[in-house]
Image (cartoon, helix red, strand yellow):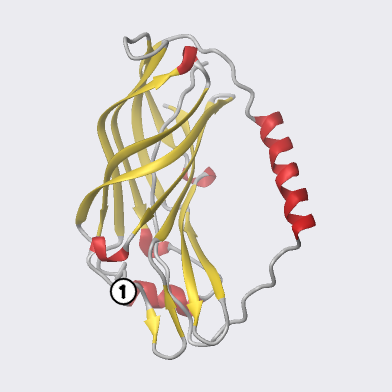
Amino acid sequence: MKKFFIVLFLLFAFCGDNSEQTPQPEASSTDTTEATITAEEESTTTTEIVQLDSFEGTVYEILKDKSRVGYLAPKQFLNSGLETVEGVTSEIIGEFTLELSECDQSDSCLYITNLLIRVDISTLKSNNSIRDSAIKSQWLESKLFPEAVFKIDELVIPNKNFDSKVEDTIVGKLSIREIELDTPFSITASLVGDEIRIQGFSEIDTTWFGFDAPTKFNAWEVLNPIGLTVDLVAKQK
């Protein structure tokens, strides 16, 4: 079995609805502590690190039914508080080629080539259909620019002793509204069975891609930066 990491990315949007919403109450410190402990315990049992054999020229394909990308948009209400709006989609296609071998920079290195991931951001959905429609026709205008793309031609990532888990920050070219920019993603990737699982996060400013963050006068405004979340599963072709 082989493992390593990947990246990606992807995608986002945001916006608001027509009515002012009441922010959810904050969880108590006890609840937060318990949730943190639970998450750490689950992480310990599900992310065992093993040493892999070297491999080369292995192509992996994104499984869209097990993957999703999305946005996290901070929404400030002028008369109340702040909430985070989330939207996600699983309309993702993509693949990449991987190699794990010895290298001069570290005990081992992961080589990523021909990484290309496409996301249909016109299918982003939140908990509000009015918001989703506004994203398509205004601001992001995903009806006119439905595709976001993240790509890496070639990347070398030092890997400790052929480990099956990788945590790193990678940089690829992110294209939204036909504007392409180098964009970093903090990622964690691990091999579980015959699948590679990747979680990633980045932040962008909407103005980088040619549009202002949504706002409604005397009601609310969305604040930059916008978070981009990635939760992908890829399988060897």
Q: Which residue is drawn at 79% across and 56% down?
A: 30
Q: Which residue lies furthest to the left in this view?
A: 179
Across and down, in percent, residue 186 comes to 43, 41
Estimate the x, y position of residue 130 in percent, counting from the top left: 47, 80
Compared to residue 108, the image places residue 138 above or below, namely below
The residue drawn where x is 53% and y is 67% is 84
**Residue that lies at the very extreme toward the front in this rendered image:** 29
Q: Is residue 86 above or below residue 214?
A: above
Residue at 39%, 45% (x, y): give it.
9
At 39% across and 64% down in the image, what residue appears?
Answer: 13
Tally the marks: 1
Q: Mark 1 points at which residue?
A: 139
Q: What's the amino acid at mark 1?
A: Trp
- Rendering coords of residue 170 (x, y %): 35, 36
Left-right relation of 68 to 100: right
Residue 214: image quadrant is: bottom left
In the image, taking residue 153 as reference, residue 81 lies left or right, namely right
